[in-house]
Image (tube, rainbow, N blue to C red):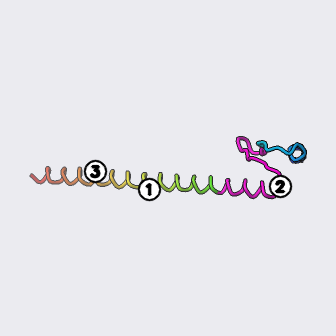
């Protein structure tokens, strides 16, 4: 609650000065430019949208890594199959 009050006080100061500044969001490393007319709900919606984009980006990366891992597993199985086939023919000869 104290964090929220501190940020609301900061917002009031920016609006009173009629200038554009970068306002820190409670989440570390996240900032958003604040202009006159912005309100807290808009900031929360933008923050949620950015979090959703990050989530989608992470999911795409995970999917690509899983595909790469599956491909490597298949390649390993093919090598093992080829090796066992060669060994089988060597034993027959």
Q: Position of residue 12 (x, y in %)?
A: 90, 47
Report if the CB atoms under discs 1 and 2 are less than 8 Å apart: no
Dot 3 or dot 2, earlier in sequence: 2
Q: Position of residue 24 (x, y in %)?
A: 78, 42
**What SS does tag 2 mark?**
loop
Q: Nearer the viewer, mark 3 or mark 2?
A: 2
Density class for disc 1 (Cα within 10 Å; few <14, some 14-19, many ≥20) is few
Task: Give the residues drawn in magenta, as a range.
Answer: 24-52
Residue occupying the point 71% across, 44% down: 30
Residue 17 placement, left or right of 21: right
**What SS does tag 1 mark?**
helix
Dot 3 or dot 1, earlier in sequence: 1
In the rendered image, the vertical position of residue 56 relative to residue 20, given as above or below: below
In the rendered image, the vertical position of residue 21 relative to residue 65, given as above or below: above
Residue occupying the point 56% across, 56% down: 59
Q: Which residue is mark 2?
A: 37
Residue occupying the point 75% across, 45% down: 27
Which numbered tag is attached to residue 50? none
Which numbered tag is attached to residue 79? 3
**What SS does tag 3 mark?**
helix
Residue 90 placement, left or right of 20: left
In the rendered image, the vertical position of residue 33 relative to residue 46, given as above or below: above
Q: Position of residue 60 (x, y in %)?
A: 53, 56
* Viewer-proximal residue among 48 and 34: 34
Report if the CB atoms under discs 3 and 1 are less than 8 Å apart: no
* Viewer-proximal residue among 60 and 44: 44
Residue 54 included in the magenta stretch of the image: no
Which numbered tag is attached to residue 67? 1
What's the distance in space between the residues labelled 3 and 1, CA to CA? 18 Å
Q: Nearer the viewer, mark 3 or mark 1?
A: 1
What's the distance in space between the residues labelled 1 and 2, CA to CA? 46 Å
Q: Position of residue 70 (x, y in %)?
A: 41, 55
């Amino acid at each position: 609650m104290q964090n929220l009050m501190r940020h609301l006080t900061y917002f009031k100061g920016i609006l009173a000065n009629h200038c554009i500044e970068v306002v820190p969001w409670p989440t570390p490393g996240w900032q958003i430019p604040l202009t006159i007319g912005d309100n807290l709900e808009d900031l929360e919606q933008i923050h949620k949208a950015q979090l959703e984009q990050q989530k989608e980006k992470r999911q795409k990366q995970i999917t690509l890594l899983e595909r790469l891992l599956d491909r490597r597993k298949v390649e390993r199985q093919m090598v093992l199959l080829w090796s066992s086939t060669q060994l089988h023919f060597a034993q027959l000869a």
